[in-house]
Image (cartoon, grey):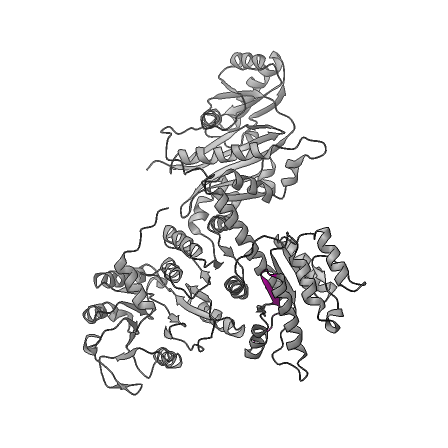
C-alpha cells in the first residue's frame, strides 16, 4: 500500500472548508428544516465570520437579504452548504468557482447510496467539483462542526461548544455522529470537531483524520467506520494522528466483502473476514471498541489521562463484590491486573484497617467513608508498585452535592490520592451515569479525572490505554527488527508439496528431509537410505487434503512395507481422484511427538498480505485457534502470535514433552512470511501444515500454494 501525498492546494482547500471565516448557505429557505437547523447552529455557536444566504429567487431569508448566486455575494466565501436538488447539483460548481469558494458540504442524497445509476451521478458531481478546484464533503452528508472555532456547517440541531474540549469525532454516518455528540454532551466530554463524510465522493475519512492530526486542540479521535475506500491513505492518516499524539479509537461495523471473496483460500476461511481488520488495528495501534458508548468513554480517557507507562492496572473500590466484578472483566478482556509486590502489600497492610485485605483490585472497605484519609494513603501505596501503570477508583460523582458537602469533601480526598500517586488515575462511576455541570466542576476542582461511563467501560478504556502504550513500546523496539517487505524474487510458481518445501528451504525455512519417488523401487531406495521409519504422501498439485483420498501412509519400515504402501496408495488415489495429476509419492522420515502448527498466508485484496498461525494437523479446522498479522512481521510479532493462541501452553511442554524453542519457531514463521512476499502478488495462499516443533527442532512437513488464475 502506498498513499499519494496531499498537494498543498488540496490541503489549503480543506483547511478553508473546516475552519471557514465566511459561509454561504446555498439553497437557503425558511421552509426547510435542514436550512433552519444550519442557520440556528451558526447563531448558537456565535459564528464570528460572515453568513451569506443564496437562493435563485433572492428576497429576504432569516432576516437578511439573499443573493441570487455565490458570485453575486461579491465577497470571499470559504465554505458553502449545498442544499439544492440532485438534478441541479453539477450546475452549482461553475458559480462556486466564480465566487472562489474553497470547499462545499453536499447535504443532498440520491447518489451512490442508490446503486450504479446514482454512483454515476456522484462521479459526475465529483468531476465537476474537481474541475472547479473545490473540495467536497459528501454527498448525502450532514456536514461538520468546528466547535473550537465556533464554525458549524451542520444540518441538525447542535448543542453549544463546551470548554476544555479534547475529543474529535469522525463518522461516515451523520446520524451516528449526532448520537455520539449527544452522548458526549451527556457525559460532559468536550468535542473539538465533528466531521461526517457521507458518500465520500472526494473528502474521505482519511482526509478528515489527516486534517485533525494537524490541529492543536484534539487529543484523541473517536472514529465510526463502515468501510475504507483508500486503504493506503487511511493507514497514512492514522499514522500521522498517532505521531501527533492523537490516538484513534475506532468502532467499525460490517466486514470486508473483498476479504470474504478471498476466504475461498484455506487461510482466509480459517481467520474470517473481520480478523484482517483486527490485524490492521494491531499494526497501526488503533484501539477497537464495540459500542458507541465505549467509543466516547475510551476516547475521552485517552484525551485526558495521557500516556500510561506500563500495562498493569490497579483498581480500587469500597466493595468486595465490585472488586470481583472488575477482576472478572479484566480477565475476560486480557487486561493486566498485576499481583502486588510484597513491599506494596506491607504498606497497604500498615495503612488499612485490620479487616481489609491488601490485594489488587483493592477493597478499601467502607472504612473510607469514615476515614477518607485512607484513600490518598492507599492510592500512593498502589502507585508505588513498579507493575502499576494506571489506577482506577470507583465512586459516583453526584449531580448535586448534599447540604453538608460530603461528596465534594470525599472527592477532594480522592484528588489528593491521585496527586500522591503521580500516575494516570481515573475515578469511574459504578454504572452509566449522567455527568452534569456541577459533577464536572466538583471533580475538576479536586483535580480528579472522572468518567460517568461505568466500571464496564472505564476498566475497558484503561485497558486500551495500557495496550496502546505497550504497542508503542513494541513498535519502537521492533522498528529495526522487522524485515523489509520482500520484493518478488521467484519467477517460478512452486506448486505441489515437494516443490513448495524445496522453495521454502531456499528461503531459510527449516524443512523435513524428503525426496520424491516416481516408482516403488525409488521409494524403497530412499526409505532405506534414511535409516528410519518413513511416511509416504501422495504428491499432486490437484489434491489439497491427502488423507481424504488415502494419500498418506505412516510409520513404515522395511522394503516390503514401503513397496506395498506405494503400490496400494497409487491405486487408491487414482480411484478416489481419477482426474488429479500425480507427480509421484514423497518419502520422508516419520516424525512422532512434538506440537503441530499451521502457518498460512493470504493476500487480502484491500489490506495486502497477511499471515496466520494456529494449532495444526487435524486440529486447524476443528479448533480454528489462530492468530493473525499483516506482513511483514518480525520475530517479536511471531512470538506475540504464539502467545495469543488458546493452545499456547502446549508449546511449554505438555505431560512431559520438551518445551518448544519459541525463538526458533518465531524465526521459522518470519521466514515463511518473507518467502510468501517474495512470491509476489499472484500468490493467493502459501500454507504449511504442519510446521512441527519438537523441542529445539522445527520443521515444515508439508506445503501448499494457491495461485491466481491466469487471465
Residue sitting at x 60%, y 12%: 559
Question: For residue 14: magenta?
Answer: no
66 versus 578 height, above or below? below
Residue 168 on image: x %, y %: 44, 66
330 sits left or right of 368 in the view: left
Residue 25 on image: x %, y %: 29, 76
Quadrant of residue 159 within the rendered picture: bottom left
Q: Residue furthest right?
A: 354
| Prevalent SS, magenta region | loop
475 versus 447 height, above or below? above
Residue sitting at x 61%, y 67%: 427
565 sits left or right of 248 in the view: right
Residue 672 on image: x %, y %: 48, 33
* Res 431 visible: no
Residue 698 on image: x %, y %: 57, 29
Q: How many badges with numbers are in the image?
A: 0
- Between 706 and 373, the one lying in front of the other is 373
527 sits left or right of 405 in the view: left
Residue sitting at x 72%, y 31%: 656
Quadrant where the C terminus sits is: top left
* Res 338 visible: yes
- Between 544 and 498, the one lying in front of the other is 498
Residue sitting at x 73%, y 55%: 345
Q: Which residues are magenta?
A: 422-435
Amino acid at each position: 500500500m502506498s498513499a499519494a501525498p496531499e498537494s498543498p492546494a488540496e490541503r489549503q482547500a480543506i483547511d478553508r472548508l473546516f475552519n471557514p471565516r465566511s459561509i454561504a448557505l446555498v439553497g437557503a429557505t425558511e421552509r426547510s428544516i435542514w436550512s433552519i437547523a444550519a442557520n440556528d447552529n451558526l447563531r448558537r455557536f456565535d459564528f464570528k465570520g460572515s453568513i451569506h444566504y443564496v437562493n435563485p429567487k433572492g428576497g429576504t431569508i432569516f432576516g437578511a437579504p439573499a443573493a441570487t448566486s455565490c458570485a453575486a455575494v461579491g465577497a470571499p466565501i470559504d465554505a458553502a452548504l449545498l442544499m439544492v436538488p440532485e438534478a441541479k447539483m453539477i450546475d452549482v460548481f461553475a458559480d462556486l468557482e466564480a465566487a472562489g469558494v474553497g470547499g462545499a458540504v453536499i447535504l443532498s442524497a440520491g447518489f451512490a447510496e442508490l446503486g450504479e445509476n446514482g454512483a454515476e451521478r456522484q462521479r459526475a458531481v465529483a468531476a465537476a467539483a474537481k474541475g472547479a478546484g473545490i473540495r467536497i464533503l459528501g454527498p448525502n452528508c450532514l456536514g461538520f462542526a468546528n466547535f473550537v472555532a465556533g464554525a458549524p456547517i451542520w444540518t441538525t440541531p447542535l448543542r453549544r461548544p463546551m470548554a476544555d474540549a479534547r475529543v474529535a469525532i469522525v463518522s461516515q454516518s451523520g446520524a451516528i455522529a449526532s448520537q455520539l455528540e449527544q452522548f458526549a454532551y451527556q457525559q460532559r466530554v468536550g468535542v473539538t470537531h465533528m466531521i461526517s463524510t457521507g458518500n465520500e465522493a472526494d473528502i474521505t475519512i482519511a482526509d478528515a483524520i489527516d486534517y485533525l492530526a494537524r490541529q492543536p486542540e484534539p487529543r484523541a479521535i473517536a472514529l465510526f467506520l463502515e468501510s475504507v475506500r483508500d486503504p493506503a491513505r487511511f493507514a497514512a492518516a492514522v499514522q500521522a494522528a498517532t505521531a501527533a499524539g492523537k490516538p484513534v479509537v475506532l468502532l467499525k461495523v460490517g466486514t470486508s466483502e473483498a476479504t470474504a471473496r478471498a476466504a475461498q483460500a484455506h487461510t482466509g476461511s480459517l481467520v474470517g473476514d473481520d480478523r484482517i481488520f483486527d490485524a490492521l488495528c494491531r499494526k497501526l495501534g488503533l484501539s477497537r471498541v464495540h459500542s458507541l458508548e465505549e467509543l466516547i468513554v475510551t476516547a475521552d480517557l485517552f484525551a485526558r489521562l495521557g500516556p500510561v507507562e506500563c500495562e498493569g492496572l490497579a483498581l480500587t473500590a469500597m466493595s468486595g463484590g465490585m472488586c470481583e466484578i472488575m477482576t472478572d472483566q479484566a480477565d475476560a478482556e486480557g487486561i493486566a491486573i498485576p499481583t502486588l509486590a510484597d513491599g506494596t502489600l506491607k504498606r497497604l497492610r500498615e495503612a488499612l484497617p485490620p479487616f481489609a485485605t491488601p490485594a489488587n483490585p483493592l477493597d478499601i472497605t467502607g472504612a473510607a467513608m469514615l476515614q477518607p484519609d485512607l484513600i490518598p494513603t492507599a492510592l500512593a501505596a498502589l502507585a508505588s508498585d513498579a507493575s502499576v501503570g494506571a489506577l482506577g477508583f470507583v465512586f459516583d460523582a453526584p449531580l448535586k452535592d448534599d447540604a453538608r458537602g460530603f461528596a465534594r469533601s470525599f472527592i477532594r480526598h480522592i484528588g489528593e490520592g491521585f496527586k500522591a500517586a503521580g500516575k494516570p488515575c481515573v475515578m469511574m462511576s459504578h454504572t452509566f451515569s449522567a455527568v452534569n455541570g456541577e459533577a464536572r466542576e466538583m471533580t475538576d476542582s479536586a483535580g480528579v479525572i472522572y468518567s460517568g461511563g461505568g466500571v464496564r467501560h472505564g476498566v475497558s478504556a484503561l485497558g486500551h490505554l495500557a495496550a496502546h502504550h505497550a504497542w508503542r513500546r513494541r513498535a519502537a523496539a521492533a522498528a529495526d527488527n522487522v524485515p523489509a517487505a520482500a520484493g518478488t524474487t521467484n519467477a517460478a510458481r512452486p506448486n505441489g508439496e515437494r516443490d513448495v518445501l524445496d522453495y521454502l528451504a531456499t528461503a531459510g525455512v527449516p524443512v523435513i528431509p524428503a525426496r520424491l519417488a516416481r516408482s516403488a523401487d525409488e521409494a524403497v531406495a530412499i526409505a532405506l537410505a534414511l535409516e528410519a521409519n518413513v511416511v509416504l504422501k501422495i504428491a499432486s498439485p490437484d489434491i489439497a487434503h491427502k488423507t481424504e483420498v488415502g494419500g498418506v501412509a505412516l510409520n513404515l519400515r522395511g522394503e516390503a512395507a514401503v513397496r506395498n504402501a506405494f503400490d496400494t496408495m497409487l491405486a487408491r488415489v487414482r480411484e478416489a481422484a481419477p482426474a488429479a495429476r500425480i507427480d509421484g509419492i514423497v518419502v520422508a522420515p516419520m516424525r512422532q511427538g512434538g506440537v503441530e502448527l499451521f502457518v498460512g498466508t493470504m493476500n487480502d485484496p484491500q489490506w495486502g498480505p497477511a499471515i496466520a498461525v494456529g494449532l495444526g494437523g487435524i486440529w486447524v479446522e476443528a479448533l480454528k485457534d489462530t492468530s493473525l498479522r499483516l506482513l511483514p512481521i518480525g520475530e517479536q510479532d511471531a512470538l506475540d502470535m504464539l502467545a495469543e493462541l488458546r493452545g499456547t501452553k502446549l508449546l511449554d511442554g505438555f505431560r512431559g514433552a520438551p518445551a518448544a524453542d519459541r525463538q526458533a519457531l518465531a524465526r521459522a514463521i518470519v521466514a515463511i512470511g518473507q518467502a510468501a512476499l517474495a512470491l509476489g502478488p499472484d500468490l493467493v495462499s502459501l500454507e504449511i501444515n504442519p510446521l512441527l516443533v519438537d523441542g529445539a527442532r522445527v520443521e515444515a512437513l508439508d506445503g501448499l500454494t494457491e495461485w491466481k488464475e491466469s487471465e
